[in-house]
Image (cartoon, rainbow, N blue to C red):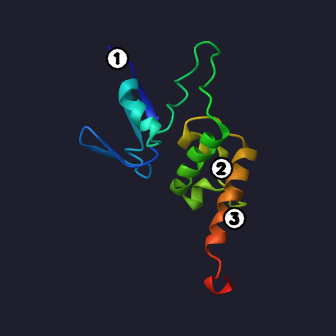
Amino acid sequence: MTDKKTYPVLSAVRHNGTLYKPDDPEHDSITLTEKEANQLLKLKVIGEPAHEDTDEATGSEPSLSDEERKRVIINVLPQLKSDTDLTKAGEPKVSVIEKLVGFDVSADEVKAIWADVQAQSAALKVDPQSE
């Protein structure tokens, strides 16, 4: 029997006739064999499996580079609902981000990424006449 794992969906993907999308609560994760998941992981269509996937030698989660972590977190930000998923200060709740990405994040990490995204968003809204 081949072991299957559940992976968070980062971009829309169709598997066995079902469309999985990050913004669809009923289909925002997908259960695949490692062989099925490999290419989708390389393409960043799915994220690393949730906490069940641990490094057997250390008992810890597989490590992602800082850049990979940032990309995964940024990819889930559009799924946030302002009324329930943000703090009173307007920043993403750490617990919500952790649920969406499937790994532990720190408040500082989320705050820094959120600030970067907000700054980039503001830069895109610059008045074109000022150029």
Is label 3 or label 1 in front? 3
Numbered circle sitting on residue 93:
2
Residue at 46% in and 37% down = 42
Contact, mark 2 vs mark 3 (Cβ under 8 Å): no
Q: Earlier in the sequence, mark 1 or mark 2?
A: 1
Q: Earlier in the sequence, mark 2 or mark 3?
A: 2
Residue 33 left/right relative to 80? left
Q: Which amino acid type is marked by label 3? A: Ala
Residue at which label 3 appears: 119
CA–CA distance in space, label 2 to label 3: 19 Å
Q: Which amino acid type is marked by label 2? A: Lys
CA–CA distance in space, label 1 to label 2: 36 Å
Residue extending furthest front?
A: 131
Secondary structure type for disc 1: loop
Q: Which amino acid type is marked by label 1? A: Thr
Q: Is residue 47 above or below residue 4?
A: below
Q: Residue 33 is drawn in which quadrant? A: top left
Q: Residue 114 is drawn in which quadrant? A: bottom right
Secondary structure type for disc 2: loop
CA–CA distance in space, label 3 to label 1: 45 Å
| Residue 8 visible here | no
Q: Is residue 74 above or below residue 57?
A: below
